[in-house]
Image (spheres, helix red, strand yellow):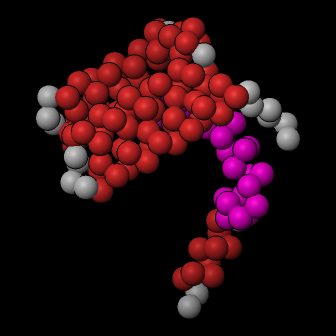
Protein backbone atom coordinates (compact mmCIF):
# COMPACT_ATOMS: atom_id res chain seq x y z
CA UNK A 1 0.00 0.00 0.00
CA UNK A 2 1.26 3.46 -0.87
CA UNK A 3 0.10 5.02 2.40
CA UNK A 4 1.36 3.53 5.63
CA UNK A 5 -0.45 4.74 8.72
CA UNK A 6 1.07 4.90 12.15
CA UNK A 7 -0.88 3.72 15.17
CA UNK A 8 -1.65 7.32 16.12
CA UNK A 9 -3.01 8.07 12.65
CA UNK A 10 -5.22 4.97 12.80
CA UNK A 11 -6.65 6.23 16.08
CA UNK A 12 -7.28 9.59 14.40
CA UNK A 13 -9.10 7.90 11.52
CA UNK A 14 -11.19 5.93 14.00
CA UNK A 15 -12.15 9.09 15.86
CA UNK A 16 -13.07 10.80 12.58
CA UNK A 17 -15.23 7.80 11.67
CA UNK A 18 -17.00 7.84 15.02
CA UNK A 19 -17.45 11.60 14.74
CA UNK A 20 -19.10 11.27 11.33
CA UNK A 21 -21.25 8.40 12.63
CA UNK A 22 -22.50 10.36 15.66
CA UNK A 23 -23.13 13.44 13.54
CA UNK A 24 -25.11 11.37 11.04
CA UNK A 25 -27.04 9.74 13.89
CA UNK A 26 -27.74 13.18 15.38
CA UNK A 27 -29.14 14.40 12.06
CA UNK A 28 -31.26 11.26 11.62
CA UNK A 29 -32.67 11.63 15.15
CA UNK A 30 -34.11 15.09 14.41
CA UNK A 31 -30.94 17.10 15.03
CA UNK A 32 -30.23 15.80 18.52
CA UNK A 33 -27.93 18.38 20.06
CA UNK A 34 -25.95 15.98 22.24
CA UNK A 35 -25.11 13.58 19.42
CA UNK A 36 -24.17 16.44 17.09
CA UNK A 37 -21.88 17.98 19.70
CA UNK A 38 -20.28 14.61 20.47
CA UNK A 39 -19.77 13.97 16.76
CA UNK A 40 -18.09 17.35 16.32
CA UNK A 41 -15.79 16.87 19.28
CA UNK A 42 -14.75 13.41 18.07
CA UNK A 43 -14.27 14.65 14.51
CA UNK A 44 -12.13 17.63 15.54
CA UNK A 45 -10.02 15.47 17.84
CA UNK A 46 -9.59 12.87 15.10
CA UNK A 47 -8.46 15.50 12.58
CA UNK A 48 -5.99 16.89 15.11
CA UNK A 49 -4.56 13.45 15.87
CA UNK A 50 -4.47 12.39 12.21
CA UNK A 51 -2.75 15.51 10.89
CA UNK A 52 -0.85 16.46 14.03
CA UNK A 53 -1.62 19.30 16.38
CA UNK A 54 0.65 21.87 14.73
CA UNK A 55 -0.57 21.08 11.20
CA UNK A 56 -4.19 21.27 12.34
CA UNK A 57 -3.52 24.63 13.98
CA UNK A 58 -1.90 25.89 10.78
CA UNK A 59 -4.82 24.57 8.72
CA UNK A 60 -7.42 26.39 10.78
CA UNK A 61 -5.48 29.64 11.18
CA UNK A 62 -3.99 30.15 7.73
CA UNK A 63 -5.20 33.22 5.88
CA UNK A 64 -6.57 31.22 2.92
CA UNK A 65 -8.75 29.13 5.23
CA UNK A 66 -10.28 31.88 7.37
CA UNK A 67 -13.65 31.63 5.63
CA UNK A 68 -13.89 27.89 6.27
CA UNK A 69 -12.58 28.12 9.83
CA UNK A 70 -14.94 30.91 10.82
CA UNK A 71 -17.96 29.21 9.29
CA UNK A 72 -17.11 25.85 10.92
CA UNK A 73 -16.57 27.37 14.35
CA UNK A 74 -19.67 29.53 13.98
CA UNK A 75 -21.63 26.38 13.11
CA UNK A 76 -20.25 24.72 16.24
CA UNK A 77 -21.36 27.75 18.24
CA UNK A 78 -24.87 27.57 16.77
CA UNK A 79 -25.01 23.90 17.73
CA UNK A 80 -24.27 24.75 21.33
CA UNK A 81 -26.88 27.55 21.46
CA UNK A 82 -29.62 25.19 20.20
CA UNK A 83 -29.80 26.13 16.52
CA UNK A 84 -28.69 22.78 15.12
CA UNK A 85 -29.93 23.13 11.53
CA UNK A 86 -28.11 26.43 10.99
CA UNK A 87 -25.07 24.99 12.76
CA UNK A 88 -24.91 21.89 10.55
CA UNK A 89 -25.29 23.94 7.37
CA UNK A 90 -22.46 26.25 8.43
CA UNK A 91 -20.27 23.32 9.45
CA UNK A 92 -20.77 21.53 6.14
CA UNK A 93 -19.85 24.69 4.25
CA UNK A 94 -16.83 25.15 6.51
CA UNK A 95 -15.67 21.58 5.89
CA UNK A 96 -15.90 22.03 2.13
CA UNK A 97 -14.06 25.35 2.35
CA UNK A 98 -11.35 23.96 4.65
CA UNK A 99 -10.75 20.61 3.01
CA UNK A 100 -11.56 21.47 -0.61
CA UNK A 101 -7.90 21.11 -1.55
CA UNK A 102 -7.86 17.49 -0.37
CA UNK A 103 -10.54 16.23 -2.78
CA UNK A 104 -8.11 15.13 -5.53
CA UNK A 105 -6.24 13.00 -2.98
CA UNK A 106 -9.47 11.53 -1.61
CA UNK A 107 -10.64 10.77 -5.15
CA UNK A 108 -7.37 8.97 -5.92
CA UNK A 109 -7.76 6.82 -2.80
CA UNK A 110 -11.42 6.05 -3.59
CA UNK A 111 -10.43 4.85 -7.07
CA UNK A 112 -8.37 2.11 -5.40
CA UNK A 113 -11.36 0.65 -3.51
CA UNK A 114 -12.75 -2.18 -5.66
CA UNK A 115 -16.50 -1.49 -5.96
CA UNK A 116 -16.52 2.20 -5.12
CA UNK A 117 -13.69 2.93 -7.54
CA UNK A 118 -15.57 1.28 -10.39
CA UNK A 119 -18.76 3.23 -9.63
CA UNK A 120 -16.88 6.53 -9.45
CA UNK A 121 -14.90 5.79 -12.59
CA UNK A 122 -17.95 4.92 -14.71
CA UNK A 123 -20.87 6.98 -13.40
CA UNK A 124 -22.51 7.24 -16.85
CA UNK A 125 -22.64 3.45 -17.22
CA UNK A 126 -24.34 3.03 -13.85
CA UNK A 127 -26.79 5.84 -14.54
CA UNK A 128 -27.67 4.42 -17.97
CA UNK A 129 -28.30 0.94 -16.53
CA UNK A 130 -30.50 2.30 -13.78
CA UNK A 131 -32.61 4.47 -16.06
CA UNK A 132 -32.89 2.20 -19.14
CA UNK A 133 -35.24 -0.09 -17.33
Compared to residue 119, the image places residue 81 above or below, namely above
Q: Main secondary structure of the magenta part?
A: helix
Q: In which quadrant is the N terminus drawn?
A: top right
Question: In the rendering, at what x and y percent does residue 125 appear?
Answer: 68, 73
Residue 97 on the magenta segment: yes
In the picture as drawn, the residue positioned furthest to the left comes out as: 82
Q: Which residue appears at 67% of the width and 45% of the height? A: 107
Camera sees residue 95: no
Question: In the rendering, at what x and y percent does residue 79 appear?
Answer: 22, 32
Q: In which quadrant is the C terminus drawn?
A: bottom right
In the picture as drawn, the residue positioned furthest to the right comes out as: 1
Total residue callouts: 0
Q: Which residue appears at 80% of the width and 32% of the height? A: 4
Residue 101 on the magenta segment: yes
Q: Which residue appears at 34% of the width and 52% of the height? A: 25
Range drawn in magenta: 94-120
Q: Quadrant of residue 38?
A: top left
Q: Is residue 83 left or right of residue 58?
A: left
Q: Quadrant of residue 75?
A: top left
Q: Is residue 114 left or right of residue 56?
A: right
Question: In the rendering, at what x and y percent does residue 59 appear?
Answer: 53, 15
Camera sees residue 96: yes
Q: Of 103 and 55, which appears nearest the observer? A: 55
Q: Quadrant of residue 58?
A: top right
Q: Which residue appears at 27% of the width and 23% of the height? A: 74
Amino acid sequence: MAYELTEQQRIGLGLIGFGIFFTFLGVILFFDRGLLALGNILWLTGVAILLGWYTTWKLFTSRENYKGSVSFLLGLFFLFVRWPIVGIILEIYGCFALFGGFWPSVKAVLYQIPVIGWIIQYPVLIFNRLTSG
